[in-house]
Image: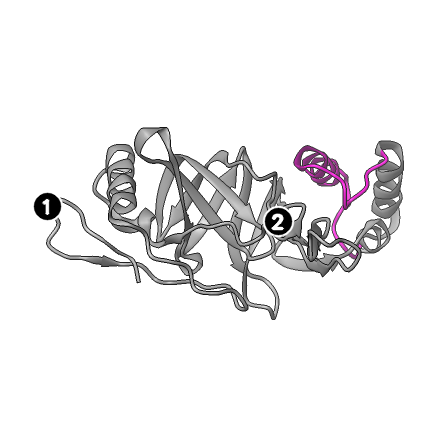
Amino acid sequence: MIILRYPGMRELMTALICLVAGFSPLEAQTTSEQTDLSAFISEKHGPDPGLINGIQFTNRYYRVKEHPFYRGEGSSRGTVTVSGRNYEDVLLNYDLYAQQVILEYQGRNSGVGKIILVTPHIDAFSLEGDYFEKRSLTEEGPLFYQVISADGISLYIHWSKLMVPNSNDLHYTYYFSKPGKDYLLDIKGTLYPFSGPSSFKSIFRGEARKQVRKYLRQHRLKFREAGTGEYAGLLGFIAGLPQWEEGQ
């Protein structure tokens, strides 16, 4: 259990320990690490304990080939909303395998520290402009979704990675798969799941379907490889169609 103390505060903060099933418990932060983190948060955001709930991040994947993160192993500039409070200009990473958000902070002597933020407390976060919210949209319950919106239409993408046995490599016993994506298209509050171009086109009817098919063909849009800008362009095109709603 991690206990962090702040100068002038009358109560102690006890962080919620979030462990990934199948991994050994992580060690508690040292006193110096606690001081570094407390100083970093106090200087950047004031004496607010909301952002420092979590456990120390350590690399559990040294025997796994590739990486489990959204962009790469390095942290990205972004924002995070914890228990309703927004924290800007922080360094974050998103572990797609463990579904955890990792905060990076500056330690002593130019060192770098990292903690895994408490998932139940996270409302939303962004990484270099890509925005994610925690929502309950399926029977799986609360999950992180990338949210892309345009004029009454929203696309929700749940990202994930798998850890796959790697029997042909003596050094790496597992490898991380390419990112998996589960899609939901929100049209005026009605959710339409789809997995690729064919099921996406089937959401629409009549002339709207023809126009969507033409757009996908002309732009050579591949859903599994598309970036945020390509998704946003598609939604903007659909929003501009005379009749784009399902059933028309």
Q: Position of residue 227 (x, y in %)?
A: 70, 37
Q: Amino acid at mark 1?
A: Gly
Q: Which residues are magenta?
A: 220-248
Query: Badge 1: how crowded within 10 Å, few (<14), some, or many (20+)?
Result: few
Q: In the image, which is nearer the foreground, mark 2 or mark 1?
A: 2
**Quarter of the figure with the N terminus:** bottom left
Task: Kindly identify the residue that appears in the image at 40 percent across and 46 percent down.
Answer: 81
Q: Is residue 244 left or right of residue 26?
A: right
- Tag 1 or tag 2, which sits nearer the N-term? 1
Q: Can you say whether 234 is above or below 54 in the image?
A: above
Between 173 and 129, the residue placed more toward the observer is 173
**Residue depicted at 55% across the width and 56% down the height:** 99
How packed is label 2: few (under 14 Cα within 10 Å), some, or many (20 or more)? many
Using the image, determine if residue 73 lies above or below residue 177.
above
- Give SS at disc 1: loop
Quarter-wise, where is residue 8 in the image? Answer: top left
In the image, farthest residue toward the top: 110
Q: Is residue 226 magenta?
A: yes
- The numbered disc on residue 8 is 1
Note whether 124 is above or below 230 in the view shown: below
Report the residue at 32% width, 52% height from top.
29
Check disc 2 and give the amino acid type. Answer: Pro
The mark found on residue 68 in the picture is 2
